[in-house]
Image (cartoon, rainbow, N blue to C red):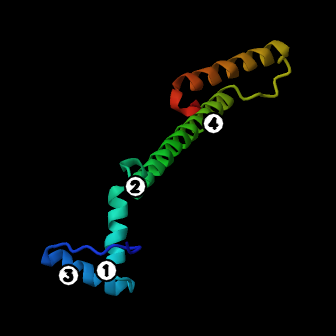
Amino acid sequence: MPANPRIHVRISDTNQRKLQKLSTERGAQMGAIVDEALTLLFLPPAERPEAVLGQQMTRLERQLDRLDAATAFQGDLLLEFIFEWLRLRPSSNPLRNSTDDARAKIELEELTRRVVDRSTPKTWN
């Protein structure tokens, strides 16, 4: 039996023209193009090039969503921090003491908690 058996098939005129055009463009034999097409057709759906590309796109979209969420969280935190800093900006008050500093620290921690609570769980997963 020959290495590559010869078969005869009938295809539509439209597909024959497309096959001849592709053969000319690629500089390949029509039989090789048909063999490549059949190989792709017989692949399991999950291994086909379009499925692999789709899986990669899905992974990339998930990573971009996480990046967007993390960026939004950081932007939110920065805005809250600037707002609180402007509101509680230290002045040259001679009566300022360590309790004022402790209160500012507690308020900053509460601010951070507020921003974290607003962030989506997707950010950290």
* Residue 46 in the image: above or below residue 24: above
Q: Earlier in the sequence, mark 3 or mark 2?
A: 3
Residue 58 point in image, percent of width and height: 45, 46
Marks 4 and 1, how far apart in space?
Answer: 62 Å
Q: Earlier in the sequence, mark 2 or mark 1?
A: 1
Q: Quadrant of residue 8?
A: bottom left
Secondary structure, mark 4, is helix
Who comes first in sequence, dot 4 or dot 2? Answer: 2
- Give whichever of discs 4 and 1 has the lower sequence position: 1
Discs 4, 2 touching: Cβ within 8 Å: no
Q: Which amino acid type is shown beneath numbered disc 1?
A: Met
Question: Percent x, y for residue 26?
Answer: 38, 83
Query: Which image quadrant: the C terminus?
Result: top right
Q: Tell me the CA gap for discs 2 and 1.
A: 22 Å
Which amino acid is tagged 2? Arg
Please give the label number shown on residue 83: none
Q: Determine whether, in the image, residue 94 is placed left or right of residue 119.
A: right
Question: In the rendered view, would you say 62 is above or below 20?
Answer: above
Q: Nearer the viewer, mark 2 or mark 1?
A: 1
Instruction: Tell me the number on the disc at residue 78.
Output: 4
Inspect the image, locate mark 4, and give the three-letter code of the amino acid beneath it.
Leu
What is the CA distance from the residue labelled 3 to the residue labelled 2? 25 Å
The extreme left residue here reads 13
Q: Amino acid at mark 3?
A: Arg
Left or right: residue 4 compared with residue 120: left
* Residue neighbourhood size for the residue with mark 3, other residues' Cα within 10 Å, grouped as few (<14), some (14–19), many (≥20): few
The residue that appears at 38% across and 83% down in the rendered structure is 28
- Circles 4 and 3 in contact, beta carbons < 8 Å: no
Q: Earlier in the sequence, mark 4 or mark 3?
A: 3
Q: Residue beneath label 1, please?
A: 30
